[in-house]
Amino acid sequence: MAVIPAFMNYDTDSVPDAVKRAVEFVTGGDPDGARAALGSIDYSDLISGRRAALKSRRVRLTRQKIWGERPAAKAMTLPRVQKAYSRQPVPISMMLSIFERDHFTCRYSHCRKRTLYVPVLRALSKLLPDALPYQSNWLPIDEHILYWTYGTSLEHRVSFPQGGTSEPENLITACYQCNDIKNMISGTDLGWEVEAERNGDWDGLNSYLCRLQHLGLSGSKNCVTSRRW
Ligand SMILES: [Zn+2]
Protein backbone atom coordinates (compact mmCIF):
# COMPACT_ATOMS: atom_id res chain seq x y z
CA MET A 1 0.00 0.00 0.00
CA ALA A 2 1.31 3.42 -0.88
CA VAL A 3 2.65 5.54 1.96
CA ILE A 4 1.68 9.07 1.03
CA PRO A 5 2.08 11.94 3.47
CA ALA A 6 -0.85 14.26 4.04
CA PHE A 7 0.34 17.14 1.87
CA MET A 8 -1.68 20.26 1.31
CA ASN A 9 -3.25 20.95 -2.07
CA TYR A 10 -0.34 22.37 -4.00
CA ASP A 11 -2.50 23.45 -6.95
CA THR A 12 -3.62 26.34 -4.76
CA ASP A 13 -0.41 26.67 -2.78
CA SER A 14 0.29 30.34 -2.10
CA VAL A 15 3.58 29.93 -0.18
CA PRO A 16 5.91 30.17 -3.23
CA ASP A 17 4.05 33.31 -4.31
CA ALA A 18 4.50 34.85 -0.85
CA VAL A 19 8.25 34.13 -0.99
CA LYS A 20 8.35 35.61 -4.49
CA ARG A 21 6.73 38.78 -3.12
CA ALA A 22 9.34 38.85 -0.35
CA VAL A 23 12.13 38.55 -2.92
CA GLU A 24 10.62 41.32 -5.03
CA PHE A 25 10.30 43.57 -1.98
CA VAL A 26 13.87 43.01 -0.86
CA THR A 27 15.36 43.49 -4.33
CA GLY A 28 13.22 46.62 -4.62
CA GLY A 29 14.76 48.08 -1.46
CA ASP A 30 11.85 47.37 0.89
CA PRO A 31 13.04 44.85 3.51
CA ASP A 32 10.05 45.57 5.78
CA GLY A 33 7.71 44.65 2.92
CA ALA A 34 9.70 41.43 2.52
CA ARG A 35 9.35 40.66 6.22
CA ALA A 36 5.60 41.24 6.00
CA ALA A 37 5.34 38.90 2.99
CA LEU A 38 7.22 36.14 4.82
CA GLY A 39 5.15 36.80 7.93
CA SER A 40 1.92 36.35 5.98
CA ILE A 41 2.65 32.64 5.48
CA ASP A 42 0.73 30.22 7.71
CA TYR A 43 3.55 27.94 8.88
CA SER A 44 1.41 25.70 11.11
CA ASP A 45 0.65 23.06 8.40
CA LEU A 46 4.30 22.99 7.36
CA ILE A 47 5.48 22.44 10.90
CA SER A 48 2.98 19.65 11.55
CA GLY A 49 4.16 17.92 8.35
CA ARG A 50 7.73 18.01 9.57
CA ARG A 51 6.68 16.67 12.99
CA ALA A 52 4.94 13.72 11.30
CA ALA A 53 8.06 12.97 9.23
CA LEU A 54 10.30 13.10 12.28
CA LYS A 55 7.93 10.75 14.07
CA SER A 56 8.34 8.28 11.18
CA ARG A 57 12.09 8.51 11.54
CA ARG A 58 11.92 7.90 15.29
CA VAL A 59 9.79 4.80 14.71
CA ARG A 60 12.34 3.48 12.21
CA LEU A 61 15.27 4.14 14.53
CA THR A 62 13.45 2.44 17.39
CA ARG A 63 12.88 -0.65 15.23
CA GLN A 64 16.53 -0.73 14.28
CA LYS A 65 17.47 -0.70 17.93
CA ILE A 66 15.03 -3.43 18.89
CA TRP A 67 15.81 -5.66 15.91
CA GLY A 68 19.53 -5.13 16.04
CA GLU A 69 19.89 -3.90 12.48
CA ARG A 70 22.83 -1.69 13.39
CA PRO A 71 26.27 -3.32 13.00
CA ALA A 72 27.71 -4.76 16.19
CA ALA A 73 30.55 -2.78 17.75
CA LYS A 74 33.12 -5.48 16.94
CA ALA A 75 32.25 -5.17 13.25
CA MET A 76 33.93 -1.78 13.32
CA THR A 77 37.33 -3.48 13.70
CA LEU A 78 36.96 -5.69 10.62
CA PRO A 79 38.70 -4.75 7.34
CA ARG A 80 36.74 -2.21 5.38
CA VAL A 81 34.78 -3.82 2.55
CA GLN A 82 34.67 -2.09 -0.81
CA LYS A 83 31.17 -0.81 -1.47
CA ALA A 84 29.48 -2.30 -4.50
CA TYR A 85 28.44 1.16 -5.69
CA SER A 86 29.97 4.60 -5.88
CA ARG A 87 28.11 7.83 -5.48
CA GLN A 88 28.93 10.13 -8.38
CA PRO A 89 28.62 13.85 -7.67
CA VAL A 90 26.27 15.67 -10.01
CA PRO A 91 27.77 18.90 -11.43
CA ILE A 92 25.79 22.02 -10.53
CA SER A 93 25.19 22.77 -14.21
CA MET A 94 23.57 19.36 -14.71
CA MET A 95 21.58 19.74 -11.51
CA LEU A 96 20.24 23.08 -12.70
CA SER A 97 19.34 21.59 -16.06
CA ILE A 98 17.27 18.92 -14.30
CA PHE A 99 15.55 21.56 -12.16
CA GLU A 100 14.83 23.66 -15.24
CA ARG A 101 13.57 20.66 -17.19
CA ASP A 102 11.15 19.98 -14.33
CA HIS A 103 10.35 23.67 -13.82
CA PHE A 104 11.59 23.45 -10.22
CA THR A 105 8.48 21.42 -9.41
CA CYS A 106 8.45 18.21 -7.37
CA ARG A 107 7.93 15.33 -9.79
CA TYR A 108 6.22 13.05 -7.29
CA SER A 109 2.63 12.84 -8.43
CA HIS A 110 1.16 13.12 -4.92
CA CYS A 111 3.06 16.39 -4.40
CA ARG A 112 3.70 18.56 -7.48
CA LYS A 113 4.92 21.34 -5.22
CA ARG A 114 6.58 24.44 -6.69
CA THR A 115 9.93 24.43 -4.91
CA LEU A 116 12.32 27.23 -3.95
CA TYR A 117 15.93 27.05 -5.12
CA VAL A 118 18.03 26.73 -1.94
CA PRO A 119 20.72 29.32 -2.92
CA VAL A 120 17.84 31.81 -3.29
CA LEU A 121 16.58 31.00 0.21
CA ARG A 122 20.10 31.32 1.60
CA ALA A 123 20.61 34.68 -0.08
CA LEU A 124 17.27 35.81 1.34
CA SER A 125 18.31 34.56 4.79
CA LYS A 126 21.52 36.52 4.57
CA LEU A 127 19.55 39.69 3.85
CA LEU A 128 16.77 38.98 6.37
CA PRO A 129 18.31 36.80 9.11
CA ASP A 130 15.58 37.83 11.55
CA ALA A 131 12.75 36.75 9.24
CA LEU A 132 14.38 33.67 7.69
CA PRO A 133 17.16 32.36 9.94
CA TYR A 134 19.39 29.49 8.84
CA GLN A 135 22.41 27.51 10.00
CA SER A 136 25.76 28.01 8.33
CA ASN A 137 26.33 24.24 8.35
CA TRP A 138 23.69 22.55 6.20
CA LEU A 139 21.30 20.75 8.53
CA PRO A 140 18.03 20.91 6.59
CA ILE A 141 15.87 19.51 9.36
CA ASP A 142 17.10 22.27 11.69
CA GLU A 143 16.68 25.10 9.20
CA HIS A 144 13.72 27.41 8.94
CA ILE A 145 10.70 25.33 7.92
CA LEU A 146 10.73 26.83 4.40
CA TYR A 147 14.05 25.14 3.64
CA TRP A 148 12.88 21.67 4.54
CA THR A 149 9.41 21.98 3.08
CA TYR A 150 10.08 23.92 -0.12
CA GLY A 151 13.81 23.57 -0.85
CA THR A 152 14.59 22.17 -4.31
CA SER A 153 16.48 18.90 -4.26
CA LEU A 154 17.78 16.35 -6.71
CA GLU A 155 16.34 12.87 -6.42
CA HIS A 156 17.60 9.62 -7.92
CA ARG A 157 14.64 7.56 -9.15
CA VAL A 158 16.71 4.41 -8.72
CA SER A 159 19.11 4.80 -5.81
CA PHE A 160 22.85 4.09 -6.01
CA PRO A 161 22.65 0.94 -3.86
CA GLN A 162 20.01 -0.38 -6.25
CA GLY A 163 22.16 0.29 -9.30
CA GLY A 164 20.98 3.78 -10.19
CA THR A 165 23.28 6.27 -11.91
CA SER A 166 23.55 10.04 -12.19
CA GLU A 167 22.41 10.05 -15.80
CA PRO A 168 19.66 12.64 -16.48
CA GLU A 169 17.01 10.00 -17.11
CA ASN A 170 17.51 8.74 -13.55
CA LEU A 171 17.33 12.21 -12.02
CA ILE A 172 14.23 14.16 -11.07
CA THR A 173 13.45 17.29 -9.12
CA ALA A 174 11.88 16.71 -5.71
CA CYS A 175 10.99 19.02 -2.88
CA TYR A 176 13.27 18.49 0.10
CA GLN A 177 10.30 17.21 2.10
CA CYS A 178 9.63 14.30 -0.28
CA ASN A 179 13.34 13.57 -0.61
CA ASP A 180 13.89 13.51 3.12
CA ILE A 181 10.81 11.45 3.95
CA LYS A 182 11.92 8.90 1.36
CA ASN A 183 15.35 8.75 2.98
CA MET A 184 13.89 8.50 6.47
CA ILE A 185 11.84 5.43 5.65
CA SER A 186 14.16 3.82 3.13
CA GLY A 187 13.82 0.11 2.57
CA THR A 188 10.06 0.46 2.34
CA ASP A 189 8.15 0.50 -0.93
CA LEU A 190 6.43 3.84 -0.60
CA GLY A 191 4.44 3.38 -3.79
CA TRP A 192 5.27 6.91 -4.89
CA GLU A 193 4.77 7.56 -8.57
CA VAL A 194 6.73 10.00 -10.70
CA GLU A 195 4.65 12.20 -12.93
CA ALA A 196 5.60 12.71 -16.58
CA GLU A 197 7.42 15.87 -17.58
CA ARG A 198 5.07 18.72 -18.31
CA ASN A 199 5.19 22.38 -19.19
CA GLY A 200 5.44 25.13 -16.61
CA ASP A 201 6.90 28.54 -15.97
CA TRP A 202 8.09 28.27 -12.35
CA ASP A 203 11.84 28.77 -11.93
CA GLY A 204 12.27 28.35 -8.17
CA LEU A 205 12.99 32.12 -8.08
CA ASN A 206 16.40 31.36 -9.62
CA SER A 207 16.06 34.39 -11.90
CA TYR A 208 16.43 36.58 -8.78
CA LEU A 209 19.53 34.84 -7.47
CA CYS A 210 22.20 37.11 -8.94
CA ARG A 211 20.43 40.24 -7.71
CA LEU A 212 19.97 38.79 -4.22
CA GLN A 213 23.58 37.67 -3.98
CA HIS A 214 24.77 41.03 -5.20
CA LEU A 215 22.70 42.73 -2.48
CA GLY A 216 24.07 40.35 0.14
CA LEU A 217 27.62 40.58 -1.23
CA SER A 218 27.84 36.82 -0.82
CA GLY A 219 29.78 36.14 -4.00
CA SER A 220 28.45 34.56 -7.16
CA LYS A 221 29.59 30.95 -6.99
CA ASN A 222 26.00 29.69 -7.04
CA CYS A 223 24.90 32.27 -9.55
CA VAL A 224 24.80 29.85 -12.46
CA THR A 225 22.37 30.61 -15.22
CA SER A 226 23.55 28.28 -17.97
CA ARG A 227 20.92 25.95 -19.38
CA ARG A 228 23.48 23.70 -21.02
CA TRP A 229 25.61 20.91 -19.60
ZN1 LIG B 1 7.40 16.84 -3.01
Image (cartoon, grey):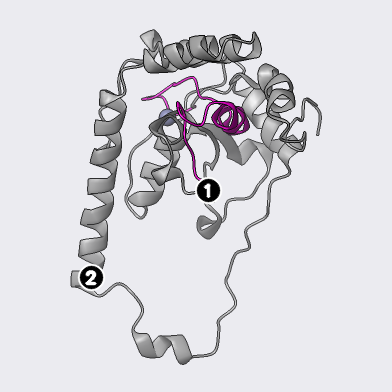
Which image quadrant: the N terminus?
top left
What residue appears at the point 39 percent right and 33 percent down from the top-left corner?
A: 145
The circle on residue 195 is none
Amino acid tagged 2:
Lys
In the rendered image, the residue lying farthest to the left is 66
| Vertical side of 152 occupied by 74: above or below | below
Q: Position of residue 127 (x, y in %)?
A: 59, 27
Quickly name the residue at label 2.
65
Amino acid tagged 1:
Trp
Quickly name the residue at label 1.
138
| Position of residue 202 in the picture relative to residue 140 (left or right) | right
Q: Is residue 56 visible?
A: yes
| Position of residue 201 in the picture relative to residue 147 (left or right) | right
What residue appears at the point 28 percent right and 42 percent down from the top-left corner?
A: 53
What residue appears at the point 21 percent right and 55 percent down from the top-left corner?
A: 59
| Vertical side of 56 occupied by 21: above or below | above
| Position of residue 141 in the picture relative to residue 124 (left or right) | left
| Foreground residue among 30 and 111 | 30
